[in-house]
Amino acid sequence: MKPTTRGTLAAVLTCMAAAAGAVAATPAAAIGTVPVPVPLNGLENSLGMELPEASGELPLPTPGSPEGPRHAEGRLIPERAVPQVPVGAGLPGADVRAPLPEVLGDGFHHLGLDAPATDLRTLGPGLALDAPLTPPNPDNFGLPDPKLPQAGVLTPVAQAVPTAYLGLEQGR
């Protein structure tokens, strides 16, 4: 094997290994959310008191491929002339932990809210049309018959199952 071929092969293998490592090192991109921390440490140190801890997750929308038009028997124009476009995304998530002063004693209780990012499935609006003519009619010498035109709007769809957890815990 020539040295240039070996060098090219080594470069290709190195790039493939780097790409595989990058895929394994980015779990946030794999689930479609970006973590967003809210830094309050500087304010906590300057005020000398415990402040709430907050972080969030922002979803990354990913467009899908629309289901194309389908031919339907008895129609000149296919069904779903303007198809609905699916977009997969999510609802943003939040994680908040706030201190609550205890009435008796020096300890703190913490109020926690955990609302993880939730998958959201959407379909954009679509359009269904039919021409004002029927298919060719053999009883009419192969000419189409007139009929009323039809038009319909396919409504958009949004589906999600959001969850949230609220709780109290003790500690500092």
Image (cartoon, rainbow, N blue to C red):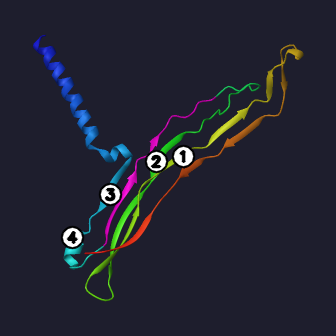
Q: Write down the residue under mark 4.
A: 42
Give me the disc on residue 122.
1
In the image, what residue occupies the spot 56% across and 50% down? 158
Instruction: Give me the C-alpha separation between circle 3 and circle 4.
Output: 17 Å
- Name the disc covering residue 151, or none: none
For the residues labelled 4 and 2, the Cα–Cα distance comes to 33 Å
Residue 142 picture location, percent across and down: 83, 14
Q: Which residue matches tag 3? A: 36
For the residues labelled 4 and 2, say whether their Cβ atoms are less than 8 Å apart. no
Circle 4 packing at 10 Å, graded few (<14), some (14-19), many (20+), is: few
Q: Is residue 67 magenta?
A: yes
Residue type for callout 4: Gly
Residue that numbered label 2 is attached to: 89
User: Relative to 81, is 40 above or below?
Assistant: below
* Residue 138 x, y percent position in the rendering: 85, 15
Mark 1 against mark 4, which lies toward the viewer?
1
Could you tell me if the residues under marks 1 and 4 are in contact, i.e. CB atoms within 8 Å? no
- The answer to whether mark 1 and mark 2 are in CB contact below 8 A is yes
